[in-house]
Amino acid sequence: MRLLTRSILGSVFAVSIALCGSVHAADVKAVAILTPEQGTDFGWNQQGVTALKEAAAKEGVKALVAENLGYGDVRPTLREMAEDGASLIIAHASGYNTAAPEIAEETKVPVAVTDKPEAMKPGLVADYTMSGHQGAYLAGRLAAKMTRTGTVGIVVSGEPPGWNSQSAAFAQGAKAEKPGITIRYAVIGPAAYSDAAGGKRVTEAVIAAGADVIFGQGNGSSFGMLEAVETTKAADGGKVWFIDVIGDKSSLDKGNLLSSVLWNLTPVFTAMIDDLKANTFGTHGYAIKLADNSVGLLKTSHIPDKVWAELQALREEVISGKIKVEPQFDASAVHALVTAVAAK
Amino acid sequence: MSLFTEPFLTALVLGAVTAGLPLLLAGLGEQMSERAGVLNVGIEGMMLAGAYGGFLVAYRSGSIPLGLFGGATCGGLVAALMALFCVRLALSQIVVGIALTLAAEGLTALLHHVQFSQTYPRLPAAATLPIPLLSAMPVVGPALFDRPLIVYLALACVPALSRLYRETHFGLALQAAGDAPAALDAAGVDVLRTRMAAVLATGVLAGTGGAFMAEIGAGLFVPFMTNGAGFIGIVLAMLARGRPLWVLWGALLFGMCLSLATALQVVGVDIPSDVIQMIPFAAVMAVLVAFGRRASLPAALGVPYRRGER
């Protein structure tokens, strides 16, 4: 009897919490996204804006976009979006994950943040810490197949969890393909997302250390990495390859873009809207993966057909679980792994 | 260790100079403003305007030197606004400086969005001017003595400004405008004109630094790319306290520490990267604070001058 009473009270409490903090199905009329840079960076920001628009169109709701907000205080913009009728605000930068939950509490408009799963609150705050580690693993296999010098590099403009996870998976993939491979790892700065000059400088140093394939993770800074591989020769005098993340820079390629770990956030944002409608928002995280093509590896003409076929076979093994690629979000785990791999 | 090959060491020294040069120009510019009594918080905006303008002119004309001139002009234009609001109209230097920086960030990002966001054009490597014999030295030769002309000109600014401050009437007027503007006024020298000249020169130097960063440092422009370099320039100028040579040491030290941080990571030293990334900031602060304590900042720094007010 006591157990039954507890169950009933618990259920009532849970439903009350969900109803108090959430938006009703009929209330979802507009979804908003805030991005730190323009949605034209062929990367994180562009993918965010594009995915939100696609998800909104799919769900029949209005999309509100605020781009190029920088990395400062976005509280005023969050409030404006709430006042403009947004039923969900996606704060598309790890630097926004303190302000957004605060404004969610203030306005009672649900927000989605990234790189802060501990901020999740049913009906009010969801986290979408993304990691394309499965794709990065394949990128590592590709890099190891293509390197001539036996050294590959990882250059990152910061160490957010999602990128740590991809760096680790890249190293694992490279090591699995070629156990004796050397991996050089360098961070441009604590949050050097737009530091293109820093991206070029650090990439040049990594190339000078012997790398002929660079796995680069950055927003604006990735263009500096691209410039570096285009203007610097590898130790053997040959071409340096570049593997990008999130977006497709093929249209900008001057002959060095080997591939990219492509992300598609449309399924994630669509799921968020569905969760809002089902009153399950903020109760679980979201993921991107090879199986549903929300993560993929870009095929360019620089990848030999034989290598691509081998990568497709590996992709199937990752999807089936035969090859296990676990995300490692912690920077120290990445350092240890890269150091261990480099030491071999 | 086999990693420390000549190409790797050359890349590190080259990177240190390339990273330090925009800071040197920004720091020298800020120092001139501060010497004249103007705390130029808008220097980040001047650098960003210079970066955008410099890249635009270089890309359209195909000439890196023309681009640097364009960057200097854009930095000067932002500085003209600073001079108008802060010197002529005596508004708050901090508020106007922040406003100009924010405006430059927004405007350059917007212009980049309209013009380049679908193409992200990149510039070819800048032509260099090798110095005979010296450029053939291992490591430092290619890093220091086989560089674009602007690198040598920027380094030459250091002794030139030292001499300007010590040995010319204008240099003395600058110092008086910062220390005792009323006395300068009483001596018959126009304080506002002196301060405006200093602010404009700051804009030109900072704009050139920004243009260098975009054209030579990165080879392209992306929004927000100065990434706080202007503010580091302010710190260098404050800590160097009036001495151009100290700005040079500070900028080079900062650049060298950036390269050191990269080297430690590439070698695979397993300590948190936050600690490694802190090295440049901590080193510059420690050295300049330790050795620059005796000098003092101008008495009227940050105080607008109005004739007749005391």
Image: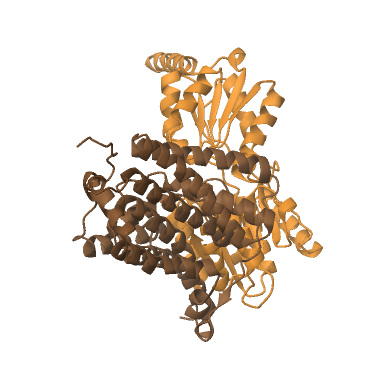
Chain colours: A orange, B brown
* Residue A105 vs residue B143, the one in the foreground: B143
Taking the image as shown, residue B301 lies to the left or right of residue A330, namely left
Q: Is residue B36 above or below residue A225?
A: above
Q: Which of the 4 image quarters holds residue B82?
A: top left
Q: Which of the 4 image quarters holds residue A272?
A: top right
**Viewer can see residue A154:** yes
Taking the image as shown, residue B112 lies to the left or right of residue B267, namely right
Q: Residue at x 60, y 24 (%)?
A: A31
**Viewer can see residue A327:** no
Measured as percent of width and height from the top left, residue B184 is found at 25, 48
* Residue B302 vs residue A45, the one in the foreground: B302
Q: Residue at x 66, y 50 (%)?
A: B120
Measured as percent of width and height from the top left, residue B43 is found at 42, 48
Furthest toward the bottom, the residue is B133
Q: Residue at x 54, y 25 (%)?
A: A281
Q: Which of the 4 image quarters holds residue A236?
A: bottom right
Taking the image as shown, residue A297 lies to the left or right of residue A158, namely right
Measured as percent of width and height from the top left, residue B68 is found at 56, 58
Q: Is residue A183 above or below residue B237?
A: below
